[in-house]
Amino acid sequence: MSLPQRDISPLAGQLEQTLSAGQLPSEICGWGSQLLQRLRQPVRVAVAGSPGSGKSALIDMLLSRVVIGRSGNGLLIDVCHGAREQVEIETAAGQRLQLPGLLAQQELPQDARRVRQTLPDPRLRWHSFRELPLAGPQAAQHEMLQQAAASADIFLWCSQDFSGAEQALWAAMPDSTKDHSFLVLTMADRQVMRGTLPAVIEALQPVAAEEFLGVYPVAAIQGLTARSAETPQDGLWRSSGGKQLAEDVQRQVQLGRASDVDQAELLIRQFGGTLPPQSTPAATVTTQGPAASAPAVSRAAPQTACLAAALDQLQTGAQAMLAEAEAAGGAQAGPVLANCMEMIRSLSQSLDTLPAGAAAEAARTAVQDGEEMLMLCQLEQDENAAVDAVTLLIQLKKELMEDPPE
């Protein structure tokens, strides 16, 4: 079962019980509370761009139906799960209106400033959308983006050419946001007809390589047509660019949820399953026995959780590349091998944050050996080497999970 289909309510309930029972050391209670909040809300996908950049059309395409249409009108729009199709409108005067149906079907008040669209779409249990209209003074746009960065998990930046002004706005975003963001070149079909798309992509590649997960040319109208057709139109869905974007966004959703799940399970195993229901508060302990070592364990917990998240990303990334590696020829094997090397070096950095110990040292040695084997694979640069590299990552993940460093 894929992660987005997994019911994590029992896990969230168990973590809440652990928190309410006071079983987490004070040093990591805040971390545990934030983790519980993330488990109980969908992964938040922000779609940003200037007016007319195709944000609404992109969201409609990803929803496979016309939900927003042309009714967005530069408003801040949230699309999330609800029991019924309903539009909630907030006006400048502070009124809150509720209308049945879809935003695309509504005529909004002139002073509407914010809209919340609810849909009984099961996919929205796992990720929601927020459309961010970027207009007005540069300072106001900057402030809106910074606020969004504090709450959004994934960013889709919509633009036809990612101009210098847009690049300046994006440059100020936190690296943690950039690590989960996509540059979407909207209305790509128009640029294809003008013959300008290849030049635009080539010009943006150096910037995108540093600032985004990738550049995604998308013809959203064609993608929506393919998704909403009565009969499958896989060819149009693929050629529109929507298929690749949708799959890669979904992969990021899975990674984000997997990281939260791993960290929650680690906290519950380490504290919820071992401490007695009514443990003695640390402030009243007078002995220098086991209680004295508790803070050291607490400080290590976030580091260990980071390792768990790194291992999960290793597994997910390796599986995603396996299909590509199995079909890779000489021209494709290089990128697969480079990705494998990047992943194992990231894992090595995660291990460097762990406290010293025999288990941690053994894990570092295993990763170092794996890195050396990957270097040998890179010398071959062929299909077999690519498959061997991905398989090595999966085996390394299993090995470390069987005997994790504490």
Image: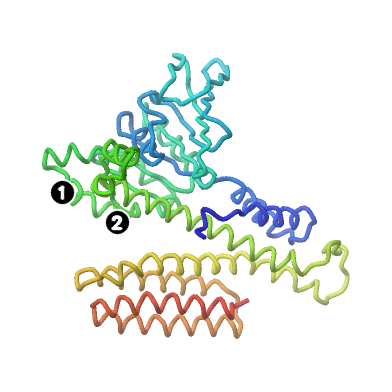
Number of residues whose C-alpha sits closer than 10 Å to that of mark 2, classed few (under 14), some (14–19) or many (20 or more):
few
Viewer-proximal residue, 312 or 303? 312
The residue that label 2 is drawn on is 209
| Image label count | 2
Mark pair 1, 2: CA separation = 16 Å
Circle nearer the N terminus (1, 2): 1
Residue 171 vertical position relative to residue 87 in the rendered view, above or below: below
Residue 195 falls in which quadrant of the image? top left
On the picture, is 116 further left or further right than 290? left
**Disc 2 residue type?**
Ala
Say which residue appears at 35% left-offset and 67% top-offset. 321
Residue 337 vertical position relative to residue 125 in the rendered view, above or below: below
**Disc 1 residue type?**
Pro
- Residue 33 in the image: state x and y as whole percent: 67, 51
- Residue 163 in the image: state x and y as whole percent: 25, 39
Viewer-proximal residue, 175 or 125? 125
Give the label on residue 198, or none: 1
Say which residue appears at 55% left-offset and 15% top-offset. 93
On the picture, is 351 further left or further right than 251? right
